[in-house]
Structures are given as C-alpha cells and as structure tokens.
Amino acid sequence: MALLTCQNLSLGYEGKIILPDLNFSVEPGSYLCIVGENGSGKSTLMKTLLGLMPPVSGQILTGDGLTQNQIGYLPQQTDAQKDFPASVWEIVLSGCQSRCGLRPFYNKTEKERARAAIERLHIGSLSGRCYRELSGGQQQRVLLARALCATKSLLLLDEPVTGLDPKASADFYQMIEELNREDKITIIMVSHDMQAALQYASHILHIGHSVFFGTKEEYQKSDAGRFFTPEGGDKR
C-alpha cells in the first residue's frame, strides 16, 4: 500500500487554483524529488502535504498508519532562524514536541529518541553548542536530526541545500541517501538541483506548465525531462 497518495489534488490560495488535478503516489522506501519552474507550486504542495494549508479540492490519503504529526519536515531556513540562540540539544529535542500531547515536558523515551537522532547524524560533538555558532552544513544536520525525531517513515525536505557550499551540499545529499537506503525512510524533496535529483531520486514529480510523475529513467525520456535535464541542455 502506498505511504501517501494524492488524488485529483488542486492547490492554491483563497480558492484560486495554481496547480490543478494532481495525481501521484509515494511507495514506502522511495525517494521522490519535486522539480519544476519557480512559482509552479512546489512549496505550496509541500505545505499541503503537511496539512499547513488545505487543498482547494481533491484529497491526500496516507497508508501504513501514517499521520501528519508523524512526518518529519525540514523547511527552508530564514536568516532569523539561522541566528536562533538555542543549543543543538534543545533544537533536536524540540522535534519530539508533537509526541508530548498536553505534557509540558519531554519524557525519557523522547530524550532517547533525540539522542539517537544526534548519533545517527554524527553531531554528538555539537550537542552542547549554540546553534547560531554553527556552519550552514552543521545547522542543516541539526535540523535534519530534529525532523528525524518526528518520524520513522517519511521526511519532507524543502530546498535543503540552499545557501550551502558544494562540499556541505554533497555531504548533506549523501546523508539523505543513507537514511533512504539504510534506514528505509521515504524521502520527498523539493529541489532546484536537477543533477542531484537524477543522481539520488527513484522518482520525479515535475510540476509547471506540464506535469510528469514517474521513475527518473522515465523522466529522462519524457518531453519535460529532455527539456530540463542537463543531458537535454537546460533551455530555461
């Protein structure tokens, strides 16, 4: 059964549709990259999948018992967020907040979950440091650890390497690939990096004037793929 399915999904604001009649499904363990032109609705789709805004029409179905508060999310960072004066431990642990319910404190299980996420992403040496003192690549690992506290099955990532240098970007992509391959975490990533999408993704969702959904191999053979991929000579 698909982990997430969008059926006849139309997205927009205040009833104005910007992306109509979207249909696709994400199987457990897959790696989906969402690509397309600026303003095509990629971030709007991400917010709708998270339940942060309602669809204009259509529905989103989840399988394997997945609920919206069990989805890990790494949003685009603002400059203000990069200067947040909290410790790495505090930020990672805050990823367990949705598990607390009405409790005003974190329990032992949640703290163990945060420690496991920190260890998994190899940032134990940063645990006591202030978040705003870290490099961009280190900050993204901290936020990824925070997202891991919320999920065992599905991560949503919105342009996660924006502003990172090439080495930090490559390290981050490698970590995501390992979480997908070794930990069997399903990945949905919005990206402008077509080369990385074709290297790591199992499936591509291209949205814009035309919509394509399929494997990356099928995408490279499609009209959209031939136009937008490096092999096709990006004509934008």
Image: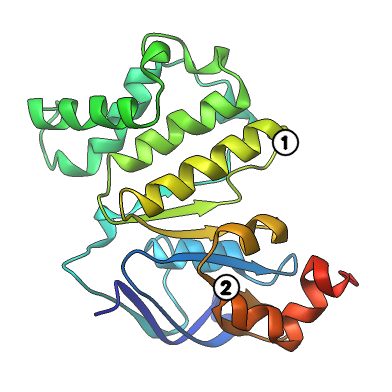
Task: Give the x, y percent position of residue 167.
Answer: 68, 32
Q: Residues within 10 Å of mark 2 (few under 14, many from 20)?
A: many
* Left or right for 229, reference 129: right
Quarter of the image with the C terminus is: bottom right
Identify the amino acid type marked 1: Pro
Label disc, if present, on residue 166 of the rendered structure = 1
State the residue at coordinates (36%, 83%): 59
> Can you tell which quarter of the image residue 193 is in?
bottom right
Q: Position of residue 55 (x, y in %)?
A: 44, 77
* Vertical relation: 222 (above or below) 191: below
Residue at horizontal 22%, vertical 62%?
67
Query: The disc labelled 2 sits on which kind of residue?
Result: Ile
Give the side of residue 218 with respect to residue 143, left or right: right
For marks 2 and 1, give the CA distance.
23 Å
Badge 1: few (under 14), some or many (20 or more) residues near its Cα, within 10 Å?
few
Q: Which residue is at 37% across, 42% downward?
A: 147
Residue 145 rendering spot, x and y as whole percentages:
37, 34
In which quadrant will I find the N terminus? bottom left
User: Can you identify the residue that label 2 sits on?
Assistant: 204
Disc 2, SS: strand
Asked which secondary structure carries label 1, the reply is helix
Return the residue nearer the eye: 167 or 117.
Answer: 167
Does residue 18 appear in this view?
Answer: no
> Is residue 120 something that shows in the picture?
yes
Q: Residue at x 50, y 68 (%)?
A: 202
